[in-house]
Amino acid sequence: MSDEYQRRLAPAALLAQDRSLERWVSIPDQVAGLYRIWRPTPLYRARALERELDTPAEIYFKYEGQSPSGSHKLNSALAQAYYAKQEGVGRLVTDTGAGQWGSALALAGALIGIEVTVYMVRASYHHKPGRRHLMETYGATVLPSPGTTTAAGRSFLSQDPEHPGSEATAVTEALEVVRSDPDARFSMGAFANHVLLHQTVIGLEAREQLALAGASDVDYLVASVGCGSNLGGLMLPWMADKLRGAQITMLGVEPTACPTLTQGEYRWDYADAMGQGPSTRTYTLGHEFVPPPIHAGGLRYHGAAPLVGLLRHEGILDAIAYRQTEVFSAGALFARLTGLVPAPETAHAIRAVIDIARRCREQSRKATILFSYSGHGLLDLGAYGRFNSGELQDVESLEQSTDSPRPPAFQEVSA
């Protein structure tokens, strides 16, 4: 991908961060000031869950659901909007699945003062109107993907008028708009190195908070993964420890409907559905893969961020996949125990934590578990309603067995 093409996609400051070899990158004063609206986010110990599971494990979670937009995504959205504004960009165009990223960028655009256009996966656009209404309230223009406003969208719909959309179709449409508008740039909610960099504020804060709580030695880091911003944000600050030999299990949790890390291939692939955007080497299900609609819309992306894919390929990151109903069962249990209703994406991590904690009980083994509570589910109550009434069904996407493989490093602690 040429430098000229990359400069048309993103502000130069973000491209420089993608390639930076610096150990630390400063947070701009304006961004840091806005972070103080809700950061640092609290670190909680899930004592009620520990008692429910009768486990000797200590379970902690970093609560990113208290941000104004409801998830961790605002950490990068504010930074991206700031750098774009500094370089005179007039509009940011992006894709969003369940709407957490779109909501965050819409709010960032309002706070920084830059126009935002969001292509929202069609299934989520219709099934999660609350997120759409939130984005529009913040001042963003929200369009369904695939839709009729782009040539790519019209092409997808001509092939399948009921196309549910995917992150890849939304990326394709967003890139088309950016190429036709010199005043616009593409904004990524995950995937790029700079996004994972911005999100490391999660893990950096958590390390300090755990030390204050007397639990600095972590045995398990657990996060849901669609593309990788949430996972990278939590785990990358521990990467040096892991590479030096620390016995830390890093576990990415995904849906069986889109099992990128558990059933994908490590190879070169495109980020968008038409193969017109950037390509990279990572774990992928193929850029033409369209995941079935599930309520964890933020986990419906065919590929992992390059850094996440590399960690998986090198055996540093473990992965597991769960079905939709068992994920919502974990989310509902957590809500009853704590009063906090997790987003479907967050509930994936909770499902894995429950299994790890149960195995610790079976082995009478103490362990410290930290997971990322990446966002709240207060705009997902319709999905919980379907689960509570027994209407929610498991949706599988591949002919292969949905019993996802468990790598040896994880197998000894999973249920």
Image: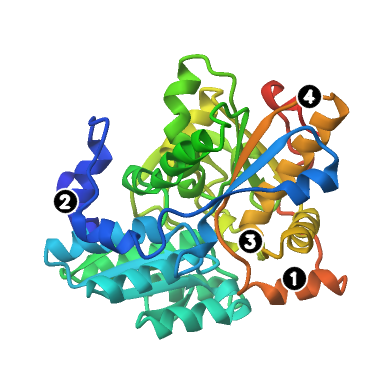
For mark 1, give the secondary structure. helix
Q: Give the CA distance from mark 1 to mark 4.
A: 33 Å
**Quarter of the view holding residue 126:** bottom right
Badge 1, how many Cα within 10 Å: few under 14, some, many 20+?
A: many
Residue closer to the observer: 58 or 335: 58
Residue under numbered circle 3: 296
For residue 365, which numbered disc appears in the image? 4
For the C terminus, the quadrant is top right
Which x, y percent locates residue 359? 82, 31
Asked whether the beta carbons under mark 4 and mark 2 sit within 8 Å of each other, the answer is: no
Which x, y percent locates residue 42? 51, 53
Residue under numbered circle 2: 12
First-in-chain label (2 vs 1): 2
For mark 3, give the secondary structure. loop
For the N terminus, the quadrant is top left
Residue under numbered circle 1: 384
First-in-chain label (4 vs 2): 2
First-in-chain label (1 vs 4): 4
Can residue 184 be seen in the rendering of this structure?
yes
**Quarter of the view holding residue 239:** top left
First-in-chain label (4 vs 3): 3
Asked whether the beta carbons under mark 1 and mark 4 sit within 8 Å of each other, the answer is: no
